[in-house]
C-alpha cells in the first residue's frame, strides 16, 4: 500500500517521519542510497529524489516472491528453509491464510544477491518439486518476479512517456548517506540542482519495493485535506473531480472507500489551492460545501483541514 506524507526541506535537510520511513527500512543509522531526476511537461517541471536502503551494487537482485503453502503447522518453516539454504534474504513480507485449513499465501520482497537470479530460483524450486523433495511436501507453488527498483533508480517515475521529459541528474549516488535523527541530508550536488535549500516536499513511499520518492512542491503550495461522502454509482467521482477542477483546485493524492455497496462511499483527498480563487480554510469549506451539496442529496463535504508545510 502506498503511503503519502508532506513536509519540508530546511537547510538542505529533510525529516522522514517513522510512519513513512520504518516500513522502508529508513530508520536512524541506516544507509540511504539516492538518485535525482528532473521532470518537465510543457512549461511545468519539478524535481524528484528517489531514496532506498538498497544501493547500486544489489538493486538488480531484489525480487518479488510469492509462495503457496498448505495451511498446516510447519508449512511456512519448509518455505523459509528452502530460501535459507540458498542464502536468500527475506525483506518485507506478508502472509495470510487465504483459505483456512487449506492454503496460505506468503508474499515477500527478497534479496538474491548471495544466490543468483530469479530464473535459477524458479528452476531449482520446480526441479525440487519434480523430484518430490521431502523438504517441500507442504509447499505447492513459488513464483518470482523482478522488482522495479532498478527502473525507478535509473529511469525515474515516467519511463517511456512521450509527454514527460525525464532527465537523470544523478543516476545513483554511489556513496550512501546515513540517517540520523530521522533526517536525510541532501548531497551538495542535489541542492545545487534545486537552486535552493528549503521548500515543501511530498513523500510517496512504496513499501513493496522499498522506495521513497521525495517530490518538490511549489513554494506557494497551500494544501488541505478534504473528505466527501458520495453515492456509490458510476459518475459520482467524476462529479467531484469536475467540481474541484472548475475551482482550479489540484488533487495531489487521494483514495476512495465503499461504505455501503451500491449505496454510499467516501472520498478523501489532499488538494492544493494555490491556483484557485478560493483561499483559506473557511472559504474553502464554505465554497466546497455549497458546490458538493448541489450535486445531490447523497453528496456532502464532511471534513476540511489544513496541512502545515
Image (tube, rainbow, N blue to C red):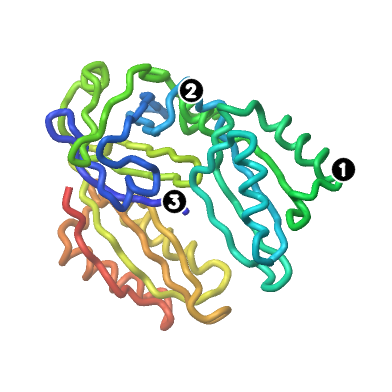
Task: Name the element at disc 1.
Answer: loop
Q: Residue at x 54, y 56 (%)?
A: 94
Q: Residue at x 59, y 34 (%)?
A: 87
Residue at numbered disc 3: 2
Task: Name the element at disc 3.
Answer: loop
Quarter residue 242 falls in: bottom left
Residue toward you, 19 or 27? 27
Category of crowding for the residue at label 3, using alpha-carbon neighbours closer than 10 angstroms: few (below 14), some (14–19), many (at least 20): few
Residue at numbered disc 1: 131
Residue at numbered disc 2: 154
Q: Is residue 290 above or below residue 216?
A: below
Mark closer to the chain start, 2 or 3: 3
The reply to whether residue 162 is in sight is no
Q: Residue at x 75, y 50 (%)?
A: 136
Distance Cα–Cα, label 2 vs label 1:
40 Å
Residue toward you, 138 or 258? 138
Image coordinates for residue 259, horizontal then vertical, percent: 48, 78
Q: Is residue 41 above or below residue 249?
A: above
Image coordinates for residue 239, horizontal then vertical, percent: 46, 65
Image coordinates for residue 195, horizontal then vertical, percent: 20, 21
Amino acid at each position: 500500500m502506498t503511503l503519502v506524507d508532506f513536509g519540508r526541506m530546511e537547510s538542505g535537510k529533510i525529516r522522514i517521519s517513522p510512519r513513512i520511513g520504518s516500513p522502508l527500512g529508513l530508520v536512524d543509522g541506516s544507509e540511504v542510497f539516492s538518485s535525482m531526476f528532473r521532470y518537465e511537461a510543457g512549461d511545468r517541471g519539478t524535481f524528484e529524489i528517489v531514496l532506498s536502503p538498497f544501493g547500486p551494487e544489489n538493486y538488480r537482485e531484489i525480487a518479488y516472491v510469492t509462495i503457496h503453502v498448505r495451511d498446516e503447522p510447519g508449512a511456512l518453516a519448509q518455505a523459509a528453509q528452502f530460501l535459507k539454504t540458498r542464502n536468500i534474504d527475506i525483506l518485507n513480507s506478508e502472509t495470510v491464510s487465504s483459505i483456512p485449513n487449506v492454503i496460505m499465501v506468503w508474499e515477500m520482497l527478497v534479496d538474491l544477491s548471495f544466490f543468483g537470479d530469479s530464473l535459477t530460483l524458479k528452476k531449482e524450486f520446480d526441479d525440487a518439486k519434480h523430484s518430490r523433495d521431502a523438504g517441500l511436501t507442504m509447499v505447492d507453488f513459488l513464483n518470482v518476479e523482478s522488482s522495479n527498483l532498478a527502473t525507478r533508480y535509473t529511469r525515474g517515475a515516467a519511463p517511456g512517456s512521450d509527454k514527460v521529459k525525464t532527465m537523470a541528474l544523478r543516476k545513483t549516488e554511489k556513496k550512501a548517506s546515513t540517517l540520523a535523527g530521522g533526517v536525510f541530508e541532501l548531497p551538495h550536488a542535489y541542492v545545487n540542482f534545486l537552486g535552493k535549500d528549503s521548500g515543501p516536499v511530498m513523500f510517496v513511499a512504496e513499501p513493496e519495493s522499498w522506495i521513497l520518492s521525495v517530490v518538490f512542491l511549489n513554494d506557494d503550495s497551500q494544501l488541505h485535506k478534504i473528505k466527501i461522502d458520495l453515492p456509490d454509482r458510476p459518475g459520482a467521482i467524476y462529479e467531484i473531480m469536475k467540481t474541484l477542477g472548475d475551482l482550479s483546485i489540484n488533487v495531489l493524492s487521494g483514495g476512495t472507500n465503499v461504505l455501503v455497496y451500491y449505496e454510499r462511499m467516501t472520498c478523501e483527498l489532499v488538494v492544493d489551492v494555490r491556483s484557485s480563487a478560493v483561499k483559506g480554510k473557511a472559504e474553502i469549506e464554505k465554497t466546497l460545501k455549497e458546490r458538493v451539496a448541489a450535486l445531490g442529496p447523497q453528496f456532502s463535504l464532511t471534513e476540511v483541514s489544513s496541512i502545515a508545510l
